[in-house]
Amino acid sequence: MRRGKVEGRWMGKAPAGYVNKIRDNKTKYIDIVEPEASHLKWAFETLAKGLFRTEAVWRFARSRGMKMTRNTFWVCIRNPVYCGKIIVPADEHNEMYLADGKHTPIISEKLFWDVQDVLNGRKKVQKFNLEVPENLVLRGFLYCPHCGKQLTGSASKGRNAYYTYYHCKSPCKARFKADDVNMEFEKDLRKFLPKPGMAQLFKEIVCDVTADDQQNFEVERKRLINEISEQNNILTKIRTMLLSEDIDLQDYKIMKSQCEDKIVRLEAELKEVKANKAVETDLSSIVDEALIRLKTLIELYDGGNTDEKRYIIGSIYQKKMIILENSDRTGDANLAAQLMYQINDGLRKKKAGVRTKIRTNSGSVPSAGVEPARFPTGV
């Protein structure tokens, strides 16, 4: 098979995250090498979320221990080898295409294509400025309660020292002391810490919510299979149209490429759905790992540098926050964080609590999955 010839030609240096090896029968292959493979997997997962620019993710990965130049990193995140695919170059008889490799993939196909969507601009990336002063860590995450615009931040010179403020832009004159806002935010962040005895309840609720996923799995699986069949039918039709000369060769190639691209992505989604179904059997350990991370959330935040703090903020809060001043607008937390907050809040309502001045959570919680938090610190 042509695929075997391509893999047999792997004579150069293995891509980052892999190492060249030789089997007993003298055939060459590539195998995963750590910790570079884990760093790359983390980078792909972070890029797919669309929270940070590519260079920011590269810097985060470097701080975790990844040893890779910026240019090499850009090449890697475009290389389908990491999802188990091999690029088969075009020849006089065939166009270039992707074939299944025999090596072990580092990431799923769906994750790879999600990252390509981010890189190609199909998924909007939130723009966070990396050069943020430590006492303005929330800059870019806050909305003005008066006009709804994004707040910026800067320092103002007082009589004896400089003072930092989060403020709006002209003509709006809204201004808030940065130290006060940062303090209120840290109070708000503590609501995600599991209260004594609530971790087990959280685990039971998540496991119970996912218990009904069998029906959803079947619906999604059938939908993807039907869409793949539809694209294959379209391919058959355009081949017939080409043979009957209803379309020219150039149009045929364009339509064929579009169909094949959709099929590759749909097949990747189908693999991901099946893989997620298989993981459900080990859901209990995944929730346990997520709870361990949540219990150390404040320590991670307090001990992190500015970039690490902003990564934690961006991972938990999906939308920008608004300072509570005669406004009910909120910023949504991710699903797992919302669920944890709702459980904790059930206990807190029985006690006299302090209401923070920053609104960050929505009141409703849709069906949630759980994924252990992954912070730049690597813990």
Image (cartoon, helix red, strand yellow):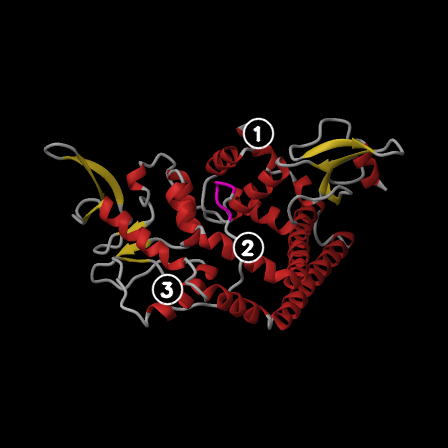
- Residue 66, by quadrant, is top right
Residue 95, above or below 228: above
Residue 362 shown in magenta: no
Tell me if 239 is positioned left or right of 1 in this view.
left
Q: Earlier in the sequence, mark 3 or mark 1?
A: 1
- Residue 115, by quadrant, is top right
* Residue 45, position as x, y percentages in the image: 55, 46
Task: State the residue at coordinates (31%, 36%).
Answer: 133
Tell me if 166 is positioned left or right of 360 in this view.
left
Name the residue beneath numbered marker 3: 362
Residue 12, above or below 156: above
Task: State the residue at coordinates (33%, 56%).
Answer: 188
Q: Judge whether residue 330 can be spotted in this image.
A: yes
Q: Main secondary structure of the magenta part?
A: loop
* Residue 350, position as x, y percentages in the image: 32, 72
Name the residue beneath numbered marker 2: 289
Q: As shown in the figure, which amino acid type bears the numbered disc 3?
A: Ser
Q: Residues within 10 Å of mark 3 (few under 14, many from 20)?
A: some
Residue 67 shows which numbered tag?
Answer: 1
Q: As shown in the figure, which amino acid type bears the numbered disc 1?
A: Lys
Q: Secondary structure at mark 1?
A: loop
Q: Earlier in the sequence, mark 1 or mark 2?
A: 1
Task: State the residue at coordinates (32%, 60%).
Answer: 330
